[in-house]
Image: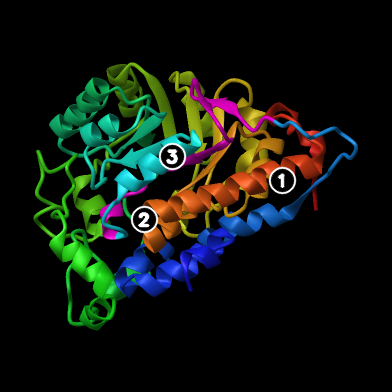
């Protein structure tokens, strides 16, 4: 299977599986416990149908919209995800370049493998930093100040990782950051020589937004679960969120909000947006899918705060359904991570090209010429 054989996001998943050692692939692909919520995140889009109009004159259409104060070529964001250097040696650099080429928002994680400063110099496109609140308050302040100095457009505070979900595939494989060659996985690494040589011979794996303060994750191998459980601040509360918003002073997002009550509190503390997200099904298994929960959130705070429906997106029509249901944009991580793992920047660009084509085709087939015409009357729930 080659990159040219990939015609949908699930095809990139198959190619990534062929090219990655199994512990690395399972880290991308896996989720918490029985992985029911991960599956539900995508399946939830099957619960409703689009209602098309015809004879609408769709020779010219406009897929652009404003997200978090910046223009986006599509109603789609690339969610921040951790340790991308483990999936392909280009890591976040490839995603940043592809996002800029397609005129899209993208984000980097506190656990990114490229620095805040490198990413800022690499792209003038809209960019978001995902903050994990650490017990080390000086580290939190240091990351915020670096983002301010680098000119990041928004800060997203992740609020759903007080403790780590039980990611059983990672427990079986022993995946850590940095990746370690264990007796159970060494054959898998040996049979993927391109990935292994890239990992061993190119620049050293590190977490440059954290290693100024902590060795864990860079020079000291740790599972993501152990990192979350030992390094992150379990006392974080709404006061913490409000204080970080004030300290940041710019466009502020809460990532991981799922209840209407929390959405209301996000409005009350002055957040600019919420990312309706269950962390890709990697935290609380059995929780609601973002798209399932979207109508309730829209009823509670629609029009008062931007709502980004995050997770499970595999098709352009999923983004269209999210907007019809009241979201301001859709976003996802695996939708580009599989492509990154499969073929680096070329893979991400091909995946985005496919999603762009699907959004444009879907809008034309619906008789829609602009994103603001994607309204609730164009959706029917089963």
Task: Report helix, strand or loop for mark 2.
Answer: helix
Q: Nearer the viewer, residue 24 or 194?
A: 194
Image height of 291 relative to 200, above or below: above
Give the class, few, some or many, for how many residues have Cα within 10 Å of label 2's Cα (few <14, many ≥20).
Answer: many
- Front residue of 186 and 64: 64
Q: Quadrant of residue 184?
A: bottom left
Who comes first in sequence, dot 1 or dot 3?
3
Residue nearest the viewer, comparing 152 with 142: 152
- Mark 1: few/some/many CA within 10 Å (<14, 14-19, 20+): some
Residue 174 in sight in this render: no
Q: Which residue is mark 3?
A: 99
Separation (CA) of disc 1 from disc 3: 20 Å
Give the labeled residue for mark 1.
361
In the rendered image, which quarter is residue 344 located in?
bottom left
SS of the residue under disc 3: helix
Q: Position of residue 301 (x, y in %)?
A: 60, 26
Residue 314: x, y in percent? 58, 55
Q: In this rendering, does residue 369 appear at all?
A: yes
The span picked out in magenta is 62-86
Residue drawn at (28%, 30%), measured in percent from left and top?
120
Q: Position of residue 71 (x, y in %)?
A: 52, 24
Query: Viewed as shown, does residue 150 lie left or right of 212?
Result: right
Residue occupied by mark 2: 344
Q: Position of residue 114 (x, y in %)?
A: 23, 43
Q: Quadrant of residue 51?
A: top right
Direction from residue 106 to residue 182 in the image, left or right: left
């Amino acid at each position: 299977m080659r990159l040219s054989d990939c015609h949908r996001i699930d095809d990139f998943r198959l190619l990534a599986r062929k090219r990655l050692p199994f512990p690395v692939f399972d880290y991308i692909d896996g989720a918490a416990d029985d992985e029911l919520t991960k599956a539900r995140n995508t399946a939830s889009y099957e619960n409703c149908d689009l209602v098309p109009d015809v004879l609408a004159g769709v020779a010219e259409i406009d897929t652009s919209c404003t997200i978090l104060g910046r223009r986006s070529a599509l109603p789609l964001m690339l969610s921040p995800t951790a340790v991308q250097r483990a999936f392909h040696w280009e890591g976040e650099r490839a995603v940043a370049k592809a996002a800029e080429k397609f005129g899209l928002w993208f984000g980097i994680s506190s656990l990114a493998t490229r620095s805040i400063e490198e990413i800022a110099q690499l792209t003038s496109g809209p960019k978001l930093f995902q903050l994990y609140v650490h017990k080390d308050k000086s580290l939190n302040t240091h990351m915020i100040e670096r983002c301010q100095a680098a000119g990041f457009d928004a800060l997203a505070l992740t609020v759903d990782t007080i403790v780590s979900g039980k990611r059983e595939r990672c427990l079986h494989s022993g995946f850590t950051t940095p990746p370690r060659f264990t007796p159970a996985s060494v054959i898998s690494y040996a049979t993927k020589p391109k990935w292994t040589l890239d990992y061993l011979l190119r620049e050293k794996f590190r977490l440059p937004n954290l290693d100024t303060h902590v060795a864990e994750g860079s020079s000291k191998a740790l599972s993501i679960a152990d990192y979350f459980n030992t390094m992150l601040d379990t006392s974080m509360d709404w006061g913490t969120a409000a204080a970080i918003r004030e300290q940041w002073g710019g466009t502020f997002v809460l990532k991981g909000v799922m209840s209407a009550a929390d959405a209301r509190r996000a409005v009350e503390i002055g957040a600019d947006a919420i990312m309706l997200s269950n962390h890709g099904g990697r935290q609380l298994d059995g929780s609601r899918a973002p798209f399932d929960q979207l109508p309730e959130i829209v009823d509670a705070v629609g029009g008062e705060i931007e709502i980004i429906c995050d997770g499970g997106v595999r098709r352009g029509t999923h983004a269209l359904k999210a907007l019809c249901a009241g979201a301001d944009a859709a976003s996802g991580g695996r939708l580009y991570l599989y492509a990154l793992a499969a073929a680096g920047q070329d893979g991400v660009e091909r995946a985005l090209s496919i999603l762009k084509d699907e959004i444009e085709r879907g809008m034309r087939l619906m008789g829609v010429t602009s994103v603001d015409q994607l309204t609730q009357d164009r959706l029917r729930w089963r």
